[in-house]
Image (cartoon, coloured by chain):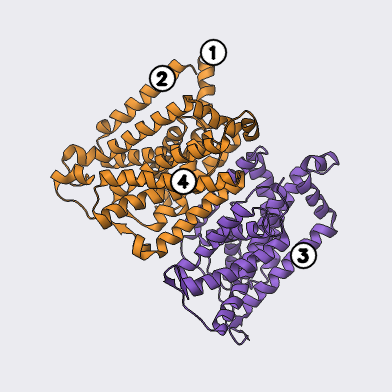
Chain colours: A orange, B purple
Amino acid sequence: MSERARLSGWTIILLTLALLPLYLHSARWIDFLEMTLFVAVLGQGWNILGGYGGQYSFGNALLFGTGAYIQALLQFKFGISPWIAMWFAIAGVVAVGAMVGFLSFRYGLRGSYFALITLAFAEAFLVLSRSLKSITEGGSGVQLALNQDPAQAIATFQFNFAGPFLKEYGFYYTIFTILLVTYAITWWMERSRFGAQLVAVRENEDAALALGINTFKVKLGAICLSSAITASCGVYYVQKFLFIEPGIAFGPSKSVEALFAPIIGGLGTVVGPLLGSVFIHGVGEATKMTIGQALGGRPGVDLILFGTILILVLAFLPRGLVGLVEAVWKRLSGGRDA
Amino acid sequence: MELLGFSLPSYGWSTIFGSTISGVFLGSIYALVAVGLTLIYGVLHIINFAHGALLMLAMYAVYFLWNILGIDPYLAMLIVVPGGFAFGYGLQRFIIGKASHGKDEITLLVTLGVAIVIENMALFFFSATERSVRVPYDLDGIDLGVTYAVYPELAALVGSFLITLALWAFMTRTDTGKAIRAVSKERQGAQLVGINVDHIFAVTFGIGVACVAAAASLLVPTYAVHPQIGSLFVLIAFTVVVLGGMGSFVGALVGGFLIGVTEQLGRLYLGESLGVITISVIFIFVLLFRPTGLFGVKAG
């Protein structure tokens, strides 16, 4: 696809995302869109290191959970403003990510071994968050006080009792802004020298090293960027739900959600995680609306579908939905611009 | 004892010894689950993320054989082990092998997809309810002085040795075993001398799942079955496999016992909830400082 086609594609996507909720005007659909964008950001966090860098993390919940806990605990224990807490959350997660990255890459862990160590760190933090009651409040989690004063809505970063517009759309435009910023960073990264070096590491790490690329530094940079993006998801989650507990924070479900979207959408592409997230949540919602009644609301259907889609995409669409869209585009435009 | 400001409780020798013994029993169960995982790693060079889900599925099979047909969990082994082999063979040959295009990192993701599908199918069809099998002899056992060992624990201990021994004999004495070892050492070379690598991969995966099915029979009398039971064991099994050395049977056995004892002592000293941190800590340290484990050879 030409750069022009890409730009017009992005304009259409972003305008749709910016205006759709105003048109839909329904709490249920806005919730659905919020969740879709949330997973699109979570997926981009994974995509930076996994998609561009070829380092598959199976423990991104470590980054999400640490961010969420810092955001929640700074407010809960010290009454720090959420707008200040979020910078500590991002910095804290980058520090944790850098530590994991430093240890893993310093000792040359690749492939299965890197996947396992990320999983191990997430599990260790799960156990710690459950056991260290004096710091984390233990298994019952942290519940933030609900602000009921409309005048304080922005100061407390809580929109439940805000004015009509903020109450309805506040969190949607929060996650939309986070999406804009993180995707712009990814777009910039893809075109930068650093991005090219990261892709070189993915394609052939030894060759990249031989060409004089400091692969350790490049991978460390990628895990830091990945951490910052994933941290923003943790911050968003806490402000929206005002609650965090060990299972949600560090359990395997966030790690899995983070990798579904980019793999299904298209690894190592800016739009991939968004496309993947829209697709899986769209399919999930469509299933609920069509045969949900027949299934009697039993749990598990979503994930059976997502897992099946994952396997099918891996089997038949090695470049994900992005690859499919590009192939269709090529055919429609008569193969003129590839 | 004082350690970094935390005071550790002090116990008598009999308490410590009792914890160690129960750690050995727990470890034999970990070893059982890990043996199949290490075999699959040794040959296919991938971590099978579906291992826990397959264990859970086999436990449901054992449960339903007991619940519907009244078959004793230990006798059920005669059905679930061949069944597990067939299921594993088909899964690798027709789904995992086909979907992963021979790339290790894709295989990893496919097994994760399989795990998610199986776990949620169990949740969908069987619900999250815990189901347990009560055999008439589950509380009988032998008094060891410091602790009391029930027959299901003893069966798991003996079973883990027998299964490891049987696998070792199979790998060294049979032609298929030799073919598996040939493929694990030199994939392309094995293909050149006429070994059907796809078939051997599927046989290996099948044997791995058969081991998990045997483990399921031995677990059901002591552990309740629910859709999440696999994930409880799988992370520990990963730790055992990495500690013992990926691909090593003896490693899986020794690693299983070491992790079991460490976990029980960890629980004794650090408390029920923080005690399991010892497993993650061992896992991280082995991965970083000795990724070949205790008995593994350097990965090629």
Q: Amino acid at mark 1?
A: Gly
Q: Residues within 10 Å of mark 2 (few under 14, many from 20)?
A: few
Q: CA distance from mark 3 to mark 2?
A: 62 Å
Q: Secondary structure at mark 2?
A: helix
Secondary structure beneath disc 4? helix
Q: Which mark is residue A97?
A: 4
Q: Residues within 10 Å of mark 4 (few under 14, many from 20)?
A: many
In this rendering, the label closer to the viewer, 3 or 4: 4
Real-space CA distance between mark 3 and mark 4, rounded to the nearest whole angstrom = 43 Å
Residue A113: x %, y % from top left:
60, 48
Describe residue A283's horizontal placement relative to residue A32 as left or right: right
Observer-nearest of B118 and B298:
B298
Q: Amino acid at mark 3?
A: Ala
SS at mark 3 in the image: helix
Q: CA distance from mark 2 to mark 4?
A: 32 Å
Q: Which residue is mark 1?
A: A334
**Among the 4 quarters of the image, the one containing residue A273:** top left
Q: Do dots 3 and 4 share one subunit? A: no
